[in-house]
Each structure stands twice: as C-alpha cells, then as structure tokens.
C-alpha cells in the first residue's frame, strides 16, 4: 500500500527543505549551500551523505522547526517535529502485505514495522524475492510509517536455515509487540507471568546448514570490508574466525545480527594485529570499523570482547596473526625447553623440526639459524628419544 499522492508530495517537500537546511549548517555539499533549490538535481549518493550527517543531530531538526526558514504552517512543522522519532538501521524487508510492507529489525530486539511505500511499490524496486537485507531510515508521517526514500539493498542470499531463523524472529516480534505501524512505538506489553513465561530465546546449536549459511553471510560482509580497506590476509583470518565461532556449542552467532558480528570479527582480528597503530600498514582505526558496519563503538567493543573471552584470544595471538607478520610476533616462537622459555628461532634445527611437528611454532625457520646459535651435537638429545619416565627427558612445550 502506498502513501496518498498528496502526502507523498508533501513528504518530499518537507524532507528536501530539511536536508537543504542541514546542508547549510554542516556544509556537506559546499556547492549546494546557497543555491536555494532544495538540493534539486543532487545525486542519490550526495543526498545520502547529507542525510547521514544529519542523523543523530536533533539540534538541527529543532533549529529548523524553530527558525522555520520556509514559513511552513504549524501542521507541517508538526510532521517535521515528529521525525525526531526516526529510526536509522538495517532491516530485513521481510514480507509484503496488503496494508504495508513488513520491515523486520536486523539489530537489537525483534521488532516488525508496517511500512507504507512512497512513489513506487517496493516490489518494483526489489529484483529478488523477499526477504532482502536493506539499510534505510524509517520515519513517522502523521499516523503511519514510511521510509525516507533512500534504501540501500545488500546482495545477500538466504538459505533455508536463515529463513527459518527469520521466521522465528518475526514470530517473536509479533508476540512481543505485534506489527508496529506508528512512531514512536507504544510501550511493550508487560511479560506474561506464571510458570509458562520464558525469560528469553532458547539456546540451541546451529545446524550444519545454518552454520554454512551464517558463515557465508558474515563472510561476504567481512570480505568486502577487508578487501576494500585492509587486505586479503585480513579477509582470510576473519572467515576462519567466523567459522570457529559457528562451531561453538551453543554458537554466540545464534543471537544478534550478522552485521554486528561481522564488525566485531574484523575488530577482533584488527585488535590482535594492532591495526590501529600508526606504524602498521594497512592501518584502520577500530572506531572506523564500527562505523563501516553501521554499529556503535560500544557495541563493537562489547561483541569483540565477547569473542576474545569465548575463544581466549589475546594480543599477538599466533593463531590470529597475519601470515606476513608472524615472523615478527615473539609469541609465535616462544617454547619451553628443559624448563626454560626460549626463542625457537635460536635453537638447534632438529629441535625446531620437533617443535614444528608438535604445532608449537608456525614453521621451521629458513634459512637455518646461524652457527653461533646452533647447539653442539653433544648437547642434542640422542636418538632414539628417552622414555616417558626418564627424569632427564627434554621437555618441549608451550
């Protein structure tokens, strides 16, 4: 169902007036500051830049209403004033019903919004069958919800396992609030009391199919960011970390949304490798990783800390160190030899090979260590190796 034609015209008039005012204050598009044409002819991408800069700045909206630079009547100012309840985020465009299209929240608690179309039905804009993954801003318009006309669709496919999870999320949303058709949302009803009430979703392990699909969705997101802003080594480690998290029982990936986990995974691998250190190449600030994935800094930090705690990951963790940096990672080469912690790069090649065989070092250093670091043959444990109960046995471990 679409908004009425006269309401659509009014919406675009008010929205462009507000965006033009915001651009005057912020100077996002310097060439458009004093044109007086409400950003007519400006590209979709540039309009998005102004919209994104304006989000989170309620002072701009308040100033527009207070100054009323276009001399708008009070009823129209009320519409603009109501936009302080707008919601910017990622959504699953889940289902098209007769009265509206259902947008299912992809972040935070499960909420289903009934959203009216603008100029064109969403079915004419979306080339793939629902559900699809999108980012936009939901706005109140009188007693209805619309999107702001700037939708970004992500090319993500959903297999049976993910579709089943979305169905469960949709059912949860309808049970908790019903389908929300006005903003701000009415308060959620009090939870049911008695023995049948449940505190939250039941934890269960991901099925094999769900594991593959979840890792694939997250992997596509981390691949895109790593290959554009970092490098292929980061992309490979992020994929490996997503796979390891998916194999946990229960998997933490079962709760939350894919973009949040993708951002936390890239943040974790970056944290291990000091990606925000000015001396590193490539370099990327951790807060910029959060921004790219559309999550808050506190959310990124919390989820990354959860990953590190779950998998016991510390700084310079050899398993999650870039291959190109492993030679400079001291933790990758420290082993215990006869009760002492030593650098495996400075011991006899025979012991290096044994350490590598046991998985204690990433590889046998090449070229061989220099002569002054090679132990004398008499000091090398004789073959065959001593028995288990030999008190003089060489201890090799980490």
Image: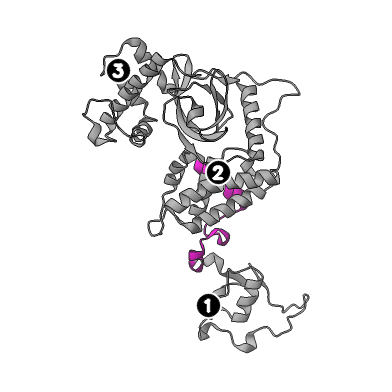
- Residue found 34% across the figure and 25% down from its top: 59
**Residue highlighted by disc 2:** 261
* Residue furthest out toward the left: 34
Q: Identify the residue at horizontal 47%, vertical 52% (top origin).
A: 226
How far is mark 1 from mark 3, CA to CA? 71 Å
Whichever of labels 3 and 2 marks the residue nearer the N terminus, that label is 3
Residue 334: x, y in percent?
A: 57, 69
- Give the alpha-carbon distance from disc 2 to disc 1, as whole Å: 38 Å
Q: Front-most of 53 and 91? A: 91
Looking at the picture, tell me which residue is in the foreground, 173 or 96: 96
Q: Secondary structure at mark 1?
A: loop
The reply to whether callout 2 and callout 1 are in contact (CB within 8 Å) is no
Does residue 306 belong to the magenta stretch? Answer: yes
Split into 4 quadrants, where in the image is the C terminus? bottom right
Place residue 17 in its image quadrant.
top left
Residue topped by disc 3: 66
Q: Residues within 10 Å of mark 1 (few under 14, many from 20)?
A: few
Taking the magenta stretch, the answer to whether it contains residue 64 is no
Q: Mark 1 or mark 3: name the one nearer the start of the chain.
A: 3
Q: Which residue is mark 1?
A: 366
**Mark number, residue 191:** none
Q: Is residue 305 visible?
A: no
User: Is 95 positioned to the left or the right of 209 in the image?
Assistant: left
Callout 3 touching callout 2 (CB < 8 Å): no
- Per the image, label 2 sits on a secondary structure element best described as helix
Q: Position of residue 254 (x, y in %)?
A: 64, 40
Residue 294: horizontal and vertical position, in percent?
A: 46, 39
Residue 300 appears in the rendering: yes
Span colored in magenta? 300-328
Looking at marks 2 and 1 on the same chain, the residue that comes earlier in the sequence is marked by: 2
């Amino acid at each position: 169902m679409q908004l009425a034609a006269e309401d659509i015209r009014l919406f675009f008039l008010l929205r462009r007036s507000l965006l033009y005012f915001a651009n005057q204050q912020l100077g996002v598009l310097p060439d458009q500051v004093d044109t007086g044409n409400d950003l007519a002819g400006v590209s979709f991408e540039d309009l998005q830049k102004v919209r994104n800069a304006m989000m989170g700045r309620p002072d701009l909206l308040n100033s527009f209403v207070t100054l009323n630079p276009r001399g708008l009547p009070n009823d129209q100012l009320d519409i603009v004033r109501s936009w302080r309840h707008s919601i910017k985020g990622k959504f699953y465009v889940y289902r098209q019903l007769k009265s509206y299209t259902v947008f299912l929240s992809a972040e935070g608690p499960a909420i289903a919004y009934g959203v009216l179309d603008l100029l064109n039905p969403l079915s004419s804009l979306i080339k793939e069958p629902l559900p699809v993954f999108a980012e936009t801003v939901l706005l109140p318009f009188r007693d209805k919800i619309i999107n702001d006309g700037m939708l970004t669709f992500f090319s993500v496919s959903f297999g049976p396992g993910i579709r089943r999870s979305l169905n469960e999320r949709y059912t949860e949303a309808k049970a908790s609030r019903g389908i929300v058709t006005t903003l701000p949302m009415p308060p959620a009803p009090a939870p049911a009391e008695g023995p049948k009430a449940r505190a939250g979703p039941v934890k269960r392990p991901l099925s094999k199919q769900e594991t593959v699909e979840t890792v694939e969705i997250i992997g596509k997101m981390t691949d895109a960011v790593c290959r554009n802003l970092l490098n292929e080594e980061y992309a490979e480690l992020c994929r490996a970390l997503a796979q390891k998290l998916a194999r946990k029982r229960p998997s933490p990936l079962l709760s939350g949304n894919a973009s949040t986990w993708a951002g936390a995974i890239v943040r974790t691998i970056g944290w291990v490798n000091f990606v925000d250190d000015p001396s590193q190449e490539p370099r990327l600030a951790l807060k910029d990783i959060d921004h790219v994935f559309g999550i808050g800094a506190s959310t990124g930090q919390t989820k990354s800390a959860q990953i590190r705690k779950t998998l016991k990951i510390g700084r310079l963790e050899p398993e999650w160190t870039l291959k190109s940096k492993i030679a400079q990672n001291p933790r990758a080469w420290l082993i215990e030899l006869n009760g002492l912690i030593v650098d495996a790069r400075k011991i006899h090649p025979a012991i290096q090979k044994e350490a590598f065989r046991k998985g204690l070092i990433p590889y046998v250093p090449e070229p061989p260590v220099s002569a002054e670091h090679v132990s004398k043959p008499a000091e090398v444990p004789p073959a065959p190796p001593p028995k288990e109960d030999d008190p003089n046995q060489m201890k090799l471990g980490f």
